[in-house]
Image (tube, helix red, strand yellow):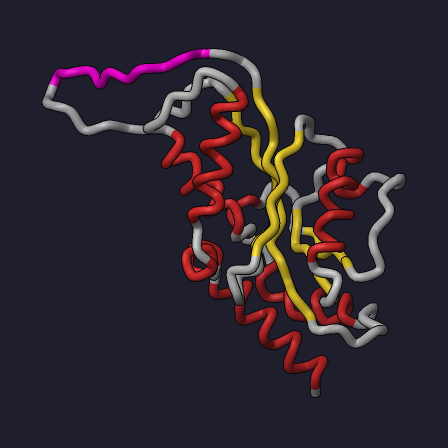
């Protein structure tokens, strides 16, 4: 089993040394998810021997939702982009840094190549703490993606624009309290609290 939960406090404390402007600190769980016109399948309860029936409009178009949620507060930032690469991540990163310009922001994120590209320009108020390889279960925002896709599984979109509007409505429908509840992994919250206590002395 990964030792990441036990070492997260130390990793966060190390990154906080870069907060030279002594800004307020926010720690986000960050990730991307693909959303498209392929139907999202979920189990259904039916009578014994009866196959479930669902209406689908099968297409292969898609887009990506880039997001970050702060589990301690439920603050969040989302951006829909057409591709998943370092250029798109840079766009998201720059907008994220501007949105939270008044704080020093740590992103806990996976080791995707677009997150580690040498061409990335990290804003001064953003730092990264990488998750261990192949460990989506440690990323709190994965729980939000699951909840979002559970809702989309009951809906049918005929175009990307229609799907985009639906996703936008659903994302905006999450309150900060709901996002905090979905992403409030105990190990993550405790590690952040301990890192902040250590730094503030």
- Residue 195's place in the image compared with 128, above or below, is below
Horizontal and vertical percent position of residue 60 = 54, 13
Q: Nearer the viewer, residue 70 or 166?
A: 166
Above or below, 160 against 19 in this view is above
Quarter in which the C terminus is drawn: bottom right
Q: Residue at x 69, y 27 (%)?
A: 83
Splitting the image into 4 quarters, where does residue 32 fall?
Answer: top right
Which residue of the protein is positioned furthest toward the bottom in this rendering?
A: 201
Total marks placed: 0
Residue 39, placed above or below residue 65: above
For the point 69% across and 70% down, the residue is 25
Q: Which residues are magenta?
A: 49-58
On the rendered structure, is 20 left or right of 173?
right
x then y, percent, for residue 90: 78, 41
Residue 178: image quadrant is bottom left
Q: Residue 131 placed where, x, y %? A: 65, 51
Q: Is residue 173 left or right of residue 29?
A: left
Extreme residue toward the left, this view: 47
Whether residue 21 sits left or right of residue 137 in the image: it is: right
Q: Is residue 54 magenta?
A: yes
- Residue 9, given in percent of the width and then of the height, sits at 65, 69
> Is residue 188 inside the magenta stretch?
no
State the residue at coordinates (77%, 58%).
126
Would you say the magenta stretch is mainly helix, strand or loop? loop
């Amino acid at each position: 089993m990964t030792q990441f939960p036990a070492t997260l406090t130390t990793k966060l404390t190390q990154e906080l040394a870069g907060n030279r402007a002594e800004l307020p600190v926010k720690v986000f769980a960050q990730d991307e998810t693909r959303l498209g016109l392929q139907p999202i399948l979920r189990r259904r309860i039916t009578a014994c021997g009866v196959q479930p029936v669902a209406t689908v409009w099968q297409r292969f178009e898609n887009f990506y939702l880039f997001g970050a949620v702060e589990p301690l507060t439920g603050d969040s930032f989302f951006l829909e982009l057409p591709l998943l690469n370092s250029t798109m991540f840079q766009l998201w990163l720059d907008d994220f840094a501007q949105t939270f310009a008044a704080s020093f922001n740590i992103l806990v994120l996976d080791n995707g190549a677009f997150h580690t590209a040498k061409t990335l320009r990290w804003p001064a108020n953003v730092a990264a703490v990488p998750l261990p390889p192949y460990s989506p279960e440690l990323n709190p925002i994965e729980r939000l993606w699951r909840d979002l896709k559970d809702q989309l599984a009951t809906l049918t979109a005929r175009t990307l624009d229609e799907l985009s509007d639906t996703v936008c409505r659903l994302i905006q429908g999450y309150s900060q309290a709901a996002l905090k509840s979905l992403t409030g992994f105990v190990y993550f919250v405790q590690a952040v609290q301990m890192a902040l206590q250590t730094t503030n002395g």
